[in-house]
Image (tube, helix red, strand yellow):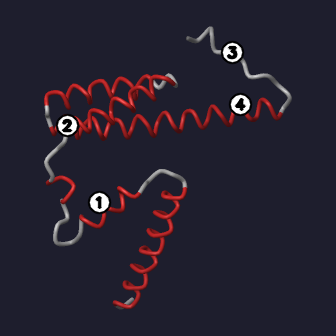
Amino acid sequence: MGSFSLLQSVEQLQRSFIEYSSGLFREGFLDGQFGQLQMLQDESNPDFVEQQNVDFKKIDAHVHQLKGSSSSIGAQRVKNTCIAFRSFCEEQKVEGCLRCLQQVKQEYLLVKAKLEALLRLEQQIVAAGGVIPMLNEFC
């Protein structure tokens, strides 16, 4: 298990990284801005993204849009996290913004998984010849 094996596994990991990243671009999860940031953040400047001056107004505008989108589909926990996030933007508190960013990511992934499960159930009901029940009694 010499350095050749280690090098080979690094190359395999790099290929996997490229394939996975390419898929994220194709599926619309990432856009060109991600690539631009990645090019700027290299070995000589690994913390480039964190070192820049924070444009709180720009961040707030994006969070405001996410809040509206999440609110329009009823994703309450994402919406509530966005409300807290916006208050940290208004106060220009980087630490609070970073915490909220992580929480928004977590809440987004959770609601995405929950909605995907709900969609699978709906598809199974329809495939079995049933009708999707209304949720009025739960709301």
Give the class, few, some or many, for how many residues have Cα within 10 Å of label 1's Cα (few <14, many ≥20). few
- The Cα–Cα distance between marks 4 and 2, rounded to whole angstroms, is 40 Å
Q: Are marks 4 and 2 in contact (CB under 8 Å)?
A: no
Answer with mark 2 or mark 1, whichever residue precedes in sequence. 1
Q: Which mark is residue 130?
A: none
Q: Quadrant of the N terminus?
A: bottom left
Answer with mark 3 or mark 2, whichever residue precedes in sequence. 2
Q: Quadrant of the C terminus?
A: top right
Residue identifier under label 2: 56
Q: Residue at x 45, y 40 (%)?
A: 109
Residue identifier under label 4: 122
Going by the numbered disc 4, the residue's amino acid type is Glu
Q: Are marks 1 and 4 in contact (CB under 8 Å)?
A: no
Answer with mark 1 or mark 3, whichever residue precedes in sequence. 1
Going by the numbered disc 2, the residue's amino acid type is Phe
Tell whether 12 sits left or right of 3. right
Answer with mark 4 or mark 2, whichever residue precedes in sequence. 2
Q: Is residue 83 above or below residue 24?
A: above
- The Cα–Cα distance between marks 1 and 4, rounded to whole angstroms, is 39 Å
Q: Are marks 2 and 1 in contact (CB under 8 Å)?
A: no
Q: Position of residue 83 (x, y in %)?
A: 30, 24
Going by the numbered disc 3, the residue's amino acid type is Met
Label 1 residue SS = helix
Q: Residue at x 16, y 72 (%)?
A: 44
Q: Which mark is residue 37?
A: 1
- The Cα–Cα distance between marks 2 and 1, rounded to whole angstroms, is 18 Å
Looking at the rendered image, the disc whose residue lies closer to the viewer, 3 or 2, is 2
Answer with mark 3 or mark 4, whichever residue precedes in sequence. 4
Q: Position of residue 92 (x, y in %)?
A: 14, 33
Q: Residue at x 22, y 36 (%)?
A: 97
Label 4 residue SS = helix
Give the class, few, some or many, for how many residues have Cα within 10 Å of label 4's Cα (few <14, many ≥20). some
